[in-house]
Image: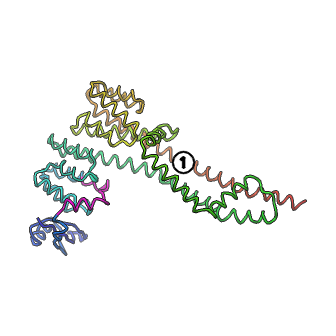
Amino acid sequence: MPVFEYSAINSTGKASKGTIDSENARAARQKLRSQGVFPTDIREVPATATGSKNSDVKRYFKSNRVSGGDLTTMTRQLSTLIGAGLPLVSGLQALTDQTESPVLQRILVEIRELVEEGSSLATALGRFPKSFPRLYINMVASGEASGRLDTVLTNLADYLEAQQELRRKVISALAYPALMLIICTLVVTALLAFVVPRIVAIFQRQGAVLPLPTRIMIFLSDSITNYWYLVIAIIVGAVSLARWYYRQERGRAVFDRALLRLPVFRTLYLKITTARVASTLSALLASGVGLLQGMEIVRNIVSNVHICKALDDAKDGVREGRSLARELSRSGEFPTMLSHMIAVGERSGELESMLDKAGKSYQNEVNAALAGLTSLLEPLLMIVVGGIVLVIVISVLLPMADLIQVMQQ
């Protein structure tokens, strides 16, 4: 069926653009008017752009992905439409017409056509792995199999919103300290590159004997001003070497183990990971996914290799009939409270509910820890920067005191 690109305005006068498929331009205009959209310009997309939509979409997605916000909004809207009794194809068409993201719009057109051809929604979503994660596809598949697609989509939208909120809080908590660190680094670099050399030159012309701190400061200043390109090359080389080592199996294991042992960061990192594991597994179980399959999916969303191994070992133990709580406790990678809550859920038959409560509990702890970490980092950065500036000032004042003594004598 031909695809048309259009520019239109709605009943409130807001301009919009998009694509719509129809038999001809006249039918496309009528279709838009029936949706309360009044086209001002409409033209058919050339066949070269639509004749091979699979390759077009794949080419389009090499550098573009659906954002987390768009995916969450689409999931919530599709859940509402299906819950209201609208057929799946009609719901996908409605989403295509109202979404403002051109990337998501093209995907929805392709998905709707695949569904019309007889594919399941999960199979159609699986054609776009960069936009729909494995967790999303498996939950949709379980919803289709159980006939509770609208409920599963609602749970999925809730889960995506919770994960986005957690990610937003982590980023916002670390953004200010990172910005302060960058500004402080620039200030110290400017002092060493422009201020210190001029002051030290005065002492050298007077023949003053420079103390060790001042000589160290001069060395750093000369390195920045005269060999800045070597400094940049060393930094870039160190970063590249670290990235290469991290991509190696041994390097990844060393780095991930360090994350689990850092004194202050360890607790926050472990709580964030535990919250994700518990919330994701709860959402999967609520959607009808089996425990073993759910643990396999959860294992794929965890980046730390040691926690992945703990989940793999726990999954093997559950497959052999052992308790999930006991297996997680034996690994030593997860908090004890999580094992206790899972044990209660297994005994009472409410594992899904207890995992959900554990995920929310740890997410609340993460929020509190982020607030405390932010309040701690701000004065700590100020102390560090103040200490560096103090060292620079002392390095300048020491030869000045010696020079004054010489002049007095």
At x 67%, y 61%, the residue is 222
Relative placement, left or right, of 218 versus 321 is: right
Pick out the residue farthest to the right. Answer: 409
Relative placement, left or right, of 332 versus 231 is: left
The quarter of the image holding the C terminus is bottom right
Q: Position of residue 229 (x, y in %)?
A: 57, 62
At x 26%, y 63%, the residue is 102
Tell whether position 183 is magenta: no
Q: How many marks?
A: 1
Tell whether position 71 is magenta: yes
Question: In the image, is residue 407 above or below residue 249?
Answer: below
Q: Which residue is mark 1?
A: 377
The quarter of the image holding the N terminus is bottom left
Disc 1 marks a residue whose amino acid type is: Leu
Question: In the image, is residue 177 above or below residue 50?
Answer: above
Q: Position of residue 295 (x, y in %)?
A: 29, 36
At x 37%, y 27%, the residue is 340
Dot 1: within a 10 Å radius of its alpha carbon, few (fewer than 14), some, or many (20 or more) residues? Answer: some
Q: Is residue 267 visible?
A: no
Q: Is residue 305 visible?
A: yes
Question: In the image, is residue 132 above or below residue 9?
Answer: above
Q: Where, by quadrant of the figure, is residue 221 drawn?
A: bottom right
Q: Main secondary structure of the magenta part?
A: helix
Relative placement, left or right, of 371 versus 361 is: right
Q: Which residues are magenta?
A: 52-74
Q: Position of residue 364 (x, y in %)?
A: 40, 40
Q: Where, by quadrant of the figure, is residue 350 drawn?
A: top left
At x 31%, y 37%, the residue is 356
For label 1, the SS is: helix
> Residue 87 versus residue 194: which sits nearer the camera?
194
